[in-house]
Amino acid sequence: MTNSSFLQLDSFFRKDDFPSIENHCDGIRYLKLRAMSRKEIMEELFEEYKIDISKLKSKEYLQFAFKCPNLTIKNIEDFIEKKYQIERKDRLQKEDYLIDQLSRLQHFDWGGSFGNSLEKNIVDNYVKKIQSFDTINKKIETELFSSLQGYTLNSWYNHWTSILIEDIFKDHTNVLPTIGLIKKIDFFINGIPFDLKVTYFPEQFFAVKLKEKGFGNELTRLKQLCRKLKILIPNDMPDKHLKQHLYTKVSECHNKEAKELINELNGLKRQIICEAEKAPEELKVWLYENQGEARFDASNRFFLVLTDEMNINNSWKLKRNIKFLKERIHSHLDSITLELDRLNTKFYWKKTQEHFNCKSDILFIKQT
């Protein structure tokens, strides 16, 4: 546990080089300390074990803790568990209330194409395009209010359901939690660090596989049938919303061709999910290679893929079905085997033309 070891491990961490960290003799020690490296938490750790830090600056805490002979791995793990249980007790008391509040959200709609850049879209689409004072006020009261409401409600829903789901993992005996909000690590499973990613089966992945199976483009097929059956196709919706809208209209149509198309589409999607579950490596690589550029990293990831097979558009509701999720997640963790051959994942990042190695696991939770 030398200065050079710490600096080397710190460099690996900043480069997302988790294999090199995990292969280092002190790598797991470094990661467990990194996973609670906020100033106030480190100060509690030192106080717990009566370690004098009066001459240290806060930016020196992590390196000092890494080298400190009076801090064993067991000391670190015991402190993490103790601290987590205190935080967990408080959240557990409010959990039923929180789930009830989350259940009140009836529609999961981002309210436009804001994505992760809300301010940029407001500036580009409203501030810079509209000159009239009356017009921009009307836009705020109608379009912008609706969009802001959708964006805020969906962000609120994702934030709190993510905390609830993380706690499901952290409550399991095979899992060592992290404390505080630390980028790249949410917990350790049998000593291996993972960043939890809760997601739904990707629409773009569906699109690729539907074409491979000869179905073609989903929106194009829906439009073709709507024209044939004289079902109105609106021209004021982006493609994503239009696809959901036409799917609903066609699925509610009693025409034989409509029923056949919906049955074929749903059957193929269930088949694609089943194939991914049996051989998940392709989807894991796809999820790494298609992550957002602004949030890119190559950390070890645990992908939790939620799917309502009866209605793909309702998959978001599974995030608040905590009892259902807990049963399946804990069942997976009870029997988990972390063989390196299964976990090792290699992917290519086009933006920087780099190859990355990491570990990843994936659990499909389906409502049928």
Image (cartoon, rainbow, N blue to C red):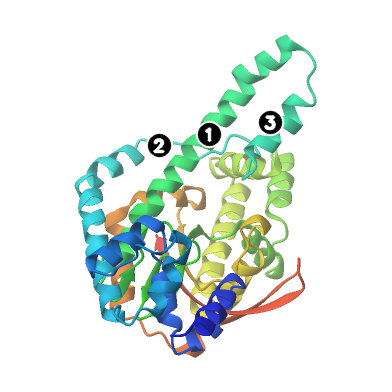
Could you tell which of marks 2 and 3 lies nearer the N-terminus?
Answer: 2
Task: Give x and y (percent) for residue 338.
Answer: 41, 84
Badge number at residue 150 = 1
Q: Nearer the viewer, residue 26 or 217?
A: 26
Between 260 and 101, the one lying in front of the other is 101
As drawn, which residue projects farthest toward the front?
55
On the image, numbered disc 3 is attached to which residue? 122
Select label 2 or label 3 by which is in front. 3
Q: Residues within 10 Å of mark 3 (few under 14, many from 20)?
A: some
Looking at the rendered structure, the secondary structure element under dot 2 is loop
Tell which tag, 3 or 1, sits nearer the viewer. 3
Amino acid carrying mark 2 in the image: Leu
Quadrant the C terminus occupies: bottom left
Residue 105 is tagged as 2
In 3D space, how far apart are the residues under numbered discs 1 and 2 (Cα atoms)? 11 Å
| Kind of residue sitting beneath label 3 | Ile
